[in-house]
């Protein structure tokens, strides 16, 4: 892994909401093809960290370099960088006024990367990849939560990004639908996608993650390979958290 | 009653036409005004926020009749004193401006509320794909906001239609103004105002029915 390219470089990142400091001092590098799972109690700053990576939250201090572009720099065209970072949300955030296929076609067509026909073609390919091609013409309100999330993953892939961010992608799902979404994510990981995942799915973390980063109160408490963190945590706070979730 | 209808029907219908013309013109401009100030209000730019709030507060804080007098009598006087002696506003122009400003302020609030009713995750999802703020607004947020706005917009439409009667004070020959003329000529106040009232009612009830139908159709498509 040593000769692999650094995809994301985070240096001394801080983020405050008013007086509340959510991220206190985060530094981290993420390599190409790496799957990083962020664990930690709620309020530890995992989601905020993830949202800083594509600047849905602007950093208060520090630098974030994605694919060689400093996204904390005001002169960086953030829209361009975002095309390369797909994001999947806890509540799917599908566009209800568009069909399943329409959701996926929006960005490629609007950003003039493809004609409508090309976008429909790639859209269908992506839907096949997540097993949703049969529902291309239905509206989001007509499909289940697990199906919605699979469509949302396909949508995030539409701009052909090489980094994917997942913000608790299975937390809003009924238990029986978690598996289908995780399966899609596993496939993505196996295909070499660089992924940053906030999740409480310990099974997924153990099986798919290259590295687990445990966060608490705005700091990285400890990080390492899944076996190390899950089976042999060193820090008190990690042990405490794992005792509660396992 | 029949005498009045017989003698003045052409006049009354013409006046109703003027009322509708004034309403439509005002609404078209009000939509534009409303959209501009609504977008100023929902954005993050403090200066725009301030201007947007100021406009809405100022216009909503002034009675329409005062606004109409100000624009019809006050503004031309002011412009003339600056040396533009030929400047004048017709009653239709002044009326349209006054109504558009007034209705625009309410429209801005309706549009703002509509935009804010759309889950903020929609904007985030769109931005995360690389779409700009403006594109996300146009392609993702506004199409959804408009659905929730339609009932309020039609309600405002009806209010504006009724408010045109206030512009009889600046001499625009709309329905209420003509009603005054007819009742003055015939001394038949009861009949005249009953007829005028019924004419307004027919138009407005028809409008509300159409509105209901549009609303139902939009909900079905959801």
Image (spheres, coloured by chain):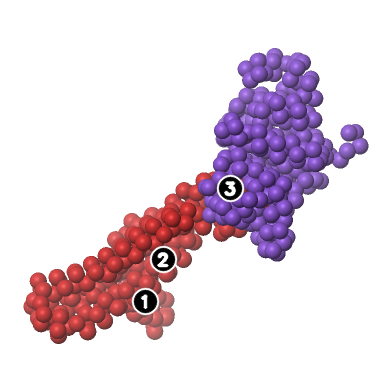
Chain colours: A purple, B red
Disc 1 crowd rating (10 Å Cα; few below 14, some 14-19, many 20+) is some
C-alpha span from label 1 to label 2: 14 Å
Looking at the image, is mark 1 or mark 2 nearer the viewer?
Answer: 2
Splitting the image into 4 quarters, where does residue A174 fall? top right
Q: Are marks 2 and 3 in contact (CB under 8 Å)?
A: no
Left or right of residue B143, residue A45 in this image: right
**Residue at the right extreme, as displayed:** A3
C-alpha span from label 1 to label 3: 45 Å
**Residue at the front extreme, as displayed:** A134
Looking at the image, is mark 1 or mark 3 nearer the viewer?
Answer: 3
In the depicted view, which residue is nearer to us: A154 or A183? A183
Left or right of residue B120, residue B220 in this image: left
Looking at the image, is mark 2 or mark 3 nearer the viewer?
Answer: 3
Mark 1 / mark 2, whichever is N-terminal? 2
> Where in the figure is residue B119, as x and y percent of width and height?
52, 46
Disc 3 crowd rating (10 Å Cα; few below 14, some 14-19, many 20+) is many
Q: Work out whether A115 lies above or below A43.
A: below
Q: Which residue is mark 3?
A: A94
> Where in the figure is residue B152, as x and y percent of width and height?
37, 57
Quarter of the figure that contains the N terminus of chain A: top right
Q: Which residue is mark 1?
A: B93
Task: In the rendered structure, find residue B30 and report the number of the disc placed on it.
Answer: 2
Label 1: which secondary element: helix
Chain of the residue displaying label 3: A
Q: Are marks 1 and 2 in contact (CB under 8 Å)?
A: no
Chain of the residue displaying label 1: B
Residue at image position (61%, 35%) is A177
């Amino acid at each position: 892994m040593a000769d692999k390219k650094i995809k994301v470089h985070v240096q001394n990142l801080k983020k405050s909401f008013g007086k509340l400091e959510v991220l206190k001092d985060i530094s981290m590098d993420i390599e190409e093809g790496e799957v990083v799972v962020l664990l930690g109690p709620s309020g530890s700053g995992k989601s905020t960290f993830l949202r800083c990576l594509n600047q849905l939250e602007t950093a208060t201090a520090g630098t974030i370099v994605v694919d060689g572009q400093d996204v904390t720099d005001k002169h960086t065209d953030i829209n361009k960088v975002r095309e390369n970072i797909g994001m999947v949300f806890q509540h799917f955030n599908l566009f209800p006024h568009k069909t399943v296929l329409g959701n996926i076609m929006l960005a490629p067509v609007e950003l003039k990367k493809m004609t409508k026909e090309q976008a429909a073609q790639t859209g269908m390919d992506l839907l096949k990849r997540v097993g949703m091609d049969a529902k291309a013409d239905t509206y989001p309100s007509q499909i289940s939560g697990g199906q919605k999330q699979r469509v949302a993953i396909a949508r995030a892939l539409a701009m052909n990004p090489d980094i994917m961010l997942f913000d608790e992608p299975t937390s809003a799902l009924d238990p029986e639908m978690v598996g289908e979404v995780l399966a899609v994510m596993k496939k993505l990981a196996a295909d070499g996608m660089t992924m940053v995942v906030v999740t409480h799915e310990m099974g997924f973390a153990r099986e798919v993650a290259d590295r687990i980063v445990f966060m608490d109160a705005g700091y990285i408490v400890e990080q390492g390979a899944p076996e190390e963190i899950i089976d042999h945590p060193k820090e008190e706070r990690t042990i405490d958290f794992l005792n509660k979730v396992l | 009653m029949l005498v009045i209808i017989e003698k003045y029907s052409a006049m009354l219908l013409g006046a109703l036409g003027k009322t509708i013309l004034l309403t439509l013109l005002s609404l078209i401009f009000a939509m534009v005004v409303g959209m501009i100030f609504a977008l100023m209000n929902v954005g993050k730019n403090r200066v725009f926020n301030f201007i947007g709030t100021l406009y809405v507060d100022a216009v909503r804080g002034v009675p329409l009749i005062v606004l109409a007098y100000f624009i019809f009598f006050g503004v031309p006087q002011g412009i003339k004193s600056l040396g533009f002696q030929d400047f004048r506003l017709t009653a239709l122009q002044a009326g349209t401006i006054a109504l558009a400003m007034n209705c625009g302020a309410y429209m801005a609030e309706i549009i703002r509320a509509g935009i804010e009713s759309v889950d903020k995750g929609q904007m985030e999802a769109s931005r995360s794909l690389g779409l700009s703020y403006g594109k996300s607004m146009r392609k993702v947020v506004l199409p959804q906001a408009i659905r929730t706005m339609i009932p309020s917009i039609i309600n405002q439409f009806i209010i504006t239609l009724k408010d045109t009667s206030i512009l009889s004070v600046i001499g625009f020959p709309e329905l209420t103004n003509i009603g005054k003329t007819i009742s003055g000529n015939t001394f038949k106040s009861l009949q005249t105002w009953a007829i005028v009232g019924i004419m307004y009612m027919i138009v407005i009830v028809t409008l509300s029915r159409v509105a209901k139908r549009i609303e139902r159709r939009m909900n079905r498509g959801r």
